[in-house]
């Protein structure tokens, strides 16, 4: 990929061979973010597991103390009292079979997170082929299949993010905006890392945290010293 002059100038500030302490890495990410919009800061965490094996899957959710800086739109599959509960809790869209039809027929995806009550998973299952690849399928481990829809919505709106491995055993998640400042980004990052470390599968062998990289939307990656993740 061909990079512009401004990007290349900012990239010179980062030594690609250096593993930076957390605070220094975050400060570099902020310095090298040069877009005209408030860039998102993302963490890219490569783990020493093999996601092809069920006993080495790493997946879960965590509420970032300062949120992500993004307004998250929630879609809830529920009926009767649970539908009313979801609406009262501030869900953006609430429904049942008619929403399945809307998604299938209209290619409608005006939402970021899907929550479902357990009794609705048979209905939601019809959308597995379209929601699955987008990472939108409700999952008990992520707290998005639940009878407590009000709590699920409150957590999501407060900054709950889901983390999961991709096919190359890397987790990609946002930890906030550049404008958050160093302290808030550090809090969010350490909260995420704590959750990922606790989620280590017992079947995982060798080095668990292979590499941790922070980067803004348009900026270069900055490697974090995984052995000193809380410094």
Image (cartoon, rainbow, N blue to C red):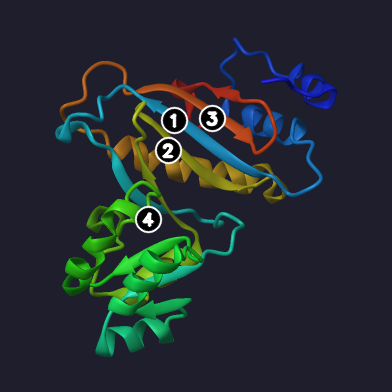
> Which residue matches tag 1?
45
Quadrant the C terminus occupies? top right
From the viewer's perspective, is the residue at label 2 or at label 3 nearer?
2
Q: Mark 1 vs mark 3: which is more N-terminal?
A: 1
Residue 151, given in percent of the width and then of the height, sits at 35, 72
Q: Label 1 crowding class (10 Å Cα cut-off): few <14, some 14-19, many 20+?
A: many
Q: Mark 2 vs mark 3: which is more N-terminal?
A: 2
Q: Quadrant of residue 169?
A: top left
> Do tag 1 and tag 3 residues touch (Cβ < 8 Å)?
no
> Which residue matches tag 2?
193
Q: Which numbered tag is attached to residue 231?
A: 3
Give the secondary structure at mark 1.
strand
Seen at 27% across and 25% down, the residue is: 49
From the viewer's perspective, is the residue at label 1 or at label 4 nearer?
4
Q: Mark 2 vs mark 4: which is more N-terminal?
A: 4
Q: Which numbered tag is attached to residue 136?
A: 4
| Residue 96 visible, this angle | no
Give the secondary structure at mark 3.
loop
Quadrant the N terminus occupies? top right
| Residue 3 visible, this angle | yes
Residue 83, given in percent of the width and then of the height, sits at 32, 84
Residue 53, given in percent of the width and then of the height, sits at 17, 30
Residue 60, given in percent of the width and then of the height, sits at 31, 48
Distance (Cα) linking label 4 and label 3: 34 Å
Seen at 28% across and 77% down, the residue is: 97
Seen at 69% across and 31% down, the residue is: 219
From the viewer's perspective, is the residue at label 4 or at label 3 nearer?
4
């Amino acid at each position: 990929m061909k990079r512009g002059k401004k990007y290349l100038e900012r990239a010179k500030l980062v030594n690609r061979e250096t593993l930076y302490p957390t605070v220094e890495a975050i400060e570099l990410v902020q310095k090298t973010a040069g877009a005209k919009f408030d860039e998102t800061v993302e963490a890219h965490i490569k783990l020493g597991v093999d996601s092809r094996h069920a006993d080495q899957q790493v997946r879960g959710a965590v509420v970032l103390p300062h949120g992500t800086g993004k307004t998250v739109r929630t879609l809830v599959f529920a009926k009767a009292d649970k539908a009313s509960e979801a609406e009262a809790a501030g869900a953006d869209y609430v429904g049942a079979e008619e929403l399945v039809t809307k998604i299938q027929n209209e290619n409608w995806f005006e939402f970021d997170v899907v929550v479902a009550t357990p009794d609705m998973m048979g209905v939601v299952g019809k959308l597995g082929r379209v929601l699955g690849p987008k990472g939108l399928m409700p999952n008990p481990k992520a707290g998005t299949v639940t009878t407590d829809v009000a709590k699920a919505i409150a957590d999501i709106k407060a900054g709950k993010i889901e983390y999961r491995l991709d096919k190359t055993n890397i987790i990609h998640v946002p930890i906030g905006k550049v404008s958050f400042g160093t302290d808030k980004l550090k809090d969010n990052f350490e909260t995420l890392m704590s959750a990922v470390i606790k989620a280590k599968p017992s079947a995982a062998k060798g080095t668990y945290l292979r590499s941790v990289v922070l980067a803004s939307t348009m900026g270069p990656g900055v490697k974090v010293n995984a052995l000193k993740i809380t410094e």
